[in-house]
Image (cartoon, rainbow, N blue to C red):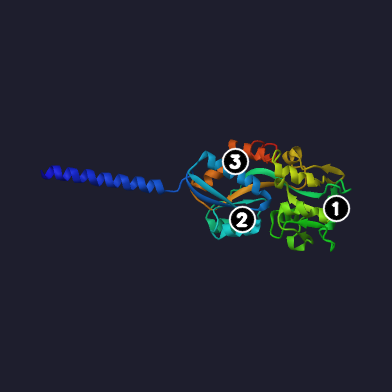
């Protein structure tokens, strides 16, 4: 009788332990379930949201929220453990990389997934047909403030400053908050030049993108006597001077939801989504997209 009692008690205890372990496992972080917030600059919000939607379709138990935040502020949140993953375009300097590795205890490993571009736009009826690197350089040092950016601390401003080997604070420009607003309101300032992210209106068959493209024309950039366009060939070869490579930066160890999302975005399905966004997939053409 005692033996039967002890056997029954052992079975109950084992069942409770197994159930407890299973419950614990069910709540454990994983790549295929849970919540994640991604901080991205508004310039590449569209491609980030498209990738998030694709991941949630593949893994229905995940919920990914995309929040727009200026690039520099998103990076600070990552360093302060307020973000698990961000999208970046500018290159970090040695001090920033060192700080990232010290704060996160992770090796700096940018997960590159797309070639995008900063483009210069004018109203559709503008007589201007191109812009030179010299005009961009001199114009951004002029008190006339002929260039309109989407804001300070933005990826567009950071990238142009980096390309011109200047600090953002040294450039002179006007501001209309938001890439889409720059396009929509540029007609009020016929002598100004808008500076926006290509992904703002790169989606080939999207009605909103079509309407935005109809409002402006994208200026080819002339450099050393050669003219370069922000088209698929210009992005793939990175000959267009303001081509930029987008990458994810994470603050998460192990293979959890942020890591799973990065892997998805950088492999076949994610790269197809990038392509449908009208951008250049980085990893499908990794031998052709050259880092400069």
Closest to the observer: 235 or 123? 123
User: Is there any visible trace of residue 78 in the rendered image?
Assistant: yes
Q: What residue does disc 1 label?
A: 134
Quadrant location, the N terminus: top left
Looking at this rendering, what residue extends furthest in the left direction?
Answer: 1
Q: Residues within 10 Å of mark 3 (few under 14, many from 20)?
A: many
Q: In the image, residue 223 lies at what x, y percent?
A: 84, 47
At 50% across and 41% down in the image, what residue appears? 60
Q: In the image, residue 98 lies at what x, y percent?
A: 60, 57
User: Is there any visible trace of residue 291 in the rendered image?
Assistant: no
Closest to the observer: 4 or 159? 4
Image position of 247 with respect to 146: above or below: above
Q: In the image, residue 199 lies at what x, y percent?
A: 70, 46
Q: Alpha-carbon distance for marks 3 and 1?
A: 36 Å
Q: Alpha-carbon distance for marks 2 and 3?
A: 22 Å
Of the numbered discs 3 and 1, the one sitting upstream in the chain is: 1
Q: What residue does disc 3 label?
A: 266
At 13% across and 43% down in the image, what residue appears? 3
In contact (CB < 8 Å): disc 2 and disc 3 = no
In contact (CB < 8 Å): disc 2 and disc 1 = no
Instruction: Tell me the element at label 1.
Output: helix
Instruction: Tell me the element at label 2.
Output: helix
Kindly report which numbered mark, 2 or 1, lies closer to the viewer in this rendering. 1
Of the numbered discs 2 and 3, the one sitting upstream in the chain is: 2
Indicate the quadrant where residue 173 lies.
Answer: bottom right
In the shown orientation, is residue 67 left or right of residue 90?
left
Of the numbered discs 2 and 1, the one sitting upstream in the chain is: 2
Q: What residue does disc 2 label?
A: 97
């Amino acid at each position: 009788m005692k033996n039967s009692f002890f056997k029954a008690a052992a079975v109950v205890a084992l069942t409770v332990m197994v159930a407890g372990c299973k419950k614990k496992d069910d709540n454990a972080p994983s790549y295929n379930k849970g919540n994640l917030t991604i901080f991205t600059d508004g310039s590449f919000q569209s491609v980030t949201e498209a990738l998030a939607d694709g991941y949630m379709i593949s893994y229905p138990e995940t919920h990914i929220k995309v929040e727009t935040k200026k690039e520099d502020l998103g990076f600070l949140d990552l360093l302060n453990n307020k973000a698990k993953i961000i999208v970046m375009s500018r290159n970090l300097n040695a001090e920033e990389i060192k700080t990232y590795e010290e704060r996160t205890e992770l090796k700096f490993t940018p997960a590159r997934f797309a070639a995008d571009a900063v483009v210069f736009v004018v109203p559709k009826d503008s007589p201007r047909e191109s812009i030179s690197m010299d005009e961009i350089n001199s114009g951004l040092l002029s008190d006339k403030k002929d260039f309109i950016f989407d804001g300070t601390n933005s990826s567009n401003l950071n990238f142009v400053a980096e390309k011109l080997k200047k600090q953002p604070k040294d450039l002179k420009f006007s501001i209309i908050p938001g890439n889409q607003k720059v396009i929509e309101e540029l007609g009020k300032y016929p002598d100004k030049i808008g500076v926006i992210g290509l992904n703002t209106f790169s989606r080939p068959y999207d009605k909103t993108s079509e309407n935005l493209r109809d409002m402006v024309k994208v200026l080819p950039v002339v450099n050393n006597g050669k003219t370069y366009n922000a088209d698929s060939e210009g992005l793939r070869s990175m000959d267009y001077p303001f081509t930029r490579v987008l990458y994810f930066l994470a603050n998460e160890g192990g293979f959890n939801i942020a890591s799973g999302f990065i892997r998805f975005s950088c492999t076949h399905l994610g790269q197809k989504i990038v392509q449908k966004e009208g951008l250049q997939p980085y990893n499908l053409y990794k031998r052709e997209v050259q880092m400069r």
